Image: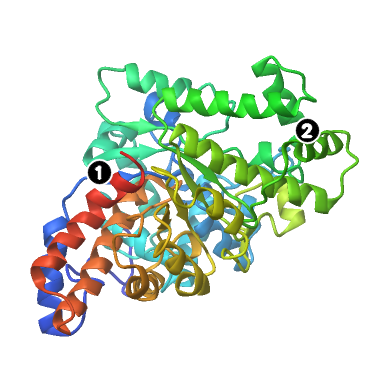
Amino acid sequence: MVTDATTPTWQLDPDRLLPVDPATRRIARELYGAVAQRPILSPHGHVPAALLRDDKPFADATELFLRHDHYVTRLLHASGFALDEVGVPALDGSRPAAPPREAWRRFCSHWRHFAGTASAYWLRDVFVTEFGITEQPNAVNADALFDRLNTHLATDAFRPRALFDRFDIALLATTDDPLDDLAAHRDLAADPGFRGRVVPTFRPDAYLDPSTPGWHERVARLAERHGTPESSYDGYLAALRERRRYFLDHGAVSADHGVREPLTVEMDHDDAAALFTTLLRGDGTAADARLFAGHMLFEMARMSVDDGLVMTVHPGVHRNHSTDTFQVYGPDTGHDIPVRTEYVQSMQPLLRRFGTAPDFHLVLFTVDETVYSREIAPLAGFYPSVYIGAPWWFLDAPDAVGRFRAATTETAGFYRSSGFIDDTRAFLSIPARHDMSRRLDAAYLARLVAEGRLDEASAHRIIDDLVDAQPRKVFKL
């Protein structure tokens, strides 16, 4: 490894994220130790099933750690680099991605910009735990790190299936288009050499919201697949039901909804059909599109009550905030920005009809953490269908997770939460993310024990349930 005298090194503190106070730390250590090696349940994420079916070696360190991780590329962009300079090519090929080694050099040279971020926490964990790298990235050792990582990635031990087994992932959920044929899932399920459980997730947003670019074309393809007239509202609903059933038949446990706002609207059937026709003709207004999208979120709840798919709602993000970046590089490239979220009024129509429906599970997420104590925890503390989604996206970071526990537990307890959800595309970070959650829950529970608010035996039961029983219950595993 090429370094110089100023190259800092790092080690993983075995007590990282645990309380500083020695007495409380002792309790947290025992709690964490009881669940540290438990298998990972990942009931919502974005790692594609084809990655595991094909089991191809990762191309190089840039492809693995930079190109598809917008947590990383967004900060490099903020530091002055175009996205193609750090590994993200333009959609039309006009700006090809920089050679992987060059992109990696830029990342290493700006490693200090990640200090204190969740990305730095996860990457350090991965580098040390999986690759034995203890030198912090910098301009001097960038090439040596790149070569060392690539040497590991070329071995069978770092192919996706070997990592899946080493990470001890008991379940991994993907996120899939409603018209996906789910061939990768089918192939994995039929492969006797693959012992894991990988399930699809129904993600219908682009088929429900008329303001989404390409909505008309998607509705047409949905109608064609179902064999019904494109203009038929009843056929449109029937086609969505059929696709949900197809996903269920392929192991799906949930339907996910990434909406700008969690608006739900109950419309009369004939009014909804007329609005659908208007929007298909292109005559509707922005208000019409918003109304219809809210109605379809309501209809998705109705379908979940009928077919049993868990309904998860991920709202509150202004997608593709940088128009120029979106046009050149496409979506999911780091410029999705959180906005304020309101649940109490927006969800009332849905909860009025389905909030107490037997076996209906509704998991509410947010990237507006002011909503935790004011809205989500009180809703989950009353409606049997509602569960508090784990900290997500900008909030799945150590301090934010601690604030989440404090904001929700006093109102709704531990058993109205979903358990940890990693929600990631970064496959190698999955163990680090779940380990972080287990440490932080151990820290929180240890404080309650040390303050005389909870006995130690109950704390052990709770942390074990948060890791295993709770996500199994919430996601019907």
For the N terminus, the quadrant is bottom left
Look at the numbered discs 1 and 2 and tell me whether their residues touch, using CB distance below 8 Å. no
Q: Position of residue 255 (x, y in %)?
A: 50, 40
Residue 216: numbered disc: 2
In this view, 298 is above or below 369: above
Residue nearest the observer in this picture, 325 or 98: 325
Query: Mark 1 vs mark 2: which is more N-terminal?
Result: 1
> Which residue does the image show at 25% across and 43% down from the upper left?
167
Q: Position of residue 175 (x, y in %)?
A: 49, 38
Q: Quadrant of residue 193?
A: top left
Q: Could you tell me if residue 132 is visible in this image?
A: no
> Which residue does the image show at 68% across and 49% down from the upper left?
294
Q: Which amino acid does the dot numbered 1 rest on?
A: Phe
Residue 167: numbered disc: 1
Instruction: Say left or right for 372 vs 31.
Output: right
Q: Could you tell me if residue 3 is visible in this image?
A: yes
Which dot, 1 or 2, sits closer to the camera? 2
Instruction: Say left or right for 453 vs 477.
Output: left
Q: Residue furthest top?
A: 227
Instruction: Say left or right for 471 vs 325.
Output: left
Residue nearest the observer in this picture, 366 or 342: 342
Instruction: Say left or right for 81 vs 453.
Output: right
Q: Quadrant of residue 433?
A: bottom left
Q: Which amino acid does the dot numbered 2 rest on?
A: His
Residue 458: numbered disc: none
Q: Secondary structure at mark 1?
A: loop
Q: Residue furthest right?
A: 283
> Which residue does the image show at 47% across and 27% down from the upper left?
247
Q: Secondary structure at mark 2?
A: helix
For the C terminus, the quadrant is top left
